[in-house]
Amino acid sequence: MFQRIFLTHPATVNETFFQHMAFALRFAGLLLAAGGAALVHAFVPCLFEKTASRIITRLHDRIHSRGH
């Protein structure tokens, strides 16, 4: 049970539990930043014009290059 919950998924991307945790926490932080930028942009369109999309593109590229 422990193996399945904590280790199986990280192993599918060639990471340890702690490497996977660090990646996921950084990913979450960047998603929060993108969301904040998009929220500000919604009210003041001249601010953060490309910030959210740039972060999302960077995260997409990271996800697709993992485990290789």
Image (cartoon, rainbow, N blue to C red):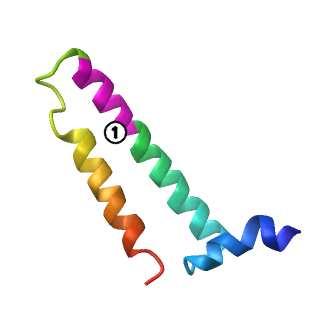
What's the amino acid at mark 1? Ala
Quarter in which the N terminus is drawn: bottom right
Q: Main secondary structure of the magenta part?
A: helix
Disc 1 secondary structure class: helix
- Identify the residue at horizontal 27%, vertical 55% (top origin): 57
Outermost residue to the left: 46
Q: What residue would you read off at disc 1?
A: 34
Residue 66 spot, x, y in % from top left? 44, 74
Which picture quadrant has residue 39? top left
Residue 39 is covered by the magenta coloring: yes
* Above-or-below relation of 52 to 17: above
Write down the region rendered in magenta.
33-42
- Identify the residue at horizontal 55%, vertical 60% (top origin): 22
- Identify the residue at horizontal 36%, vertical 57% (top origin): 59
* Above-or-below relation of 54 to 1: above
Outermost residue to the top: 43
Residue 45 spot, x, y in % from top left? 15, 21
Which picture quadrant has residue 61? bottom left
Binning the other alpha carbons within 10 Å of mark 1 as few (below 14), some (14 to 19) or many (20 upward) gives some
Q: Is residue 57 left or right of residue 20?
A: left
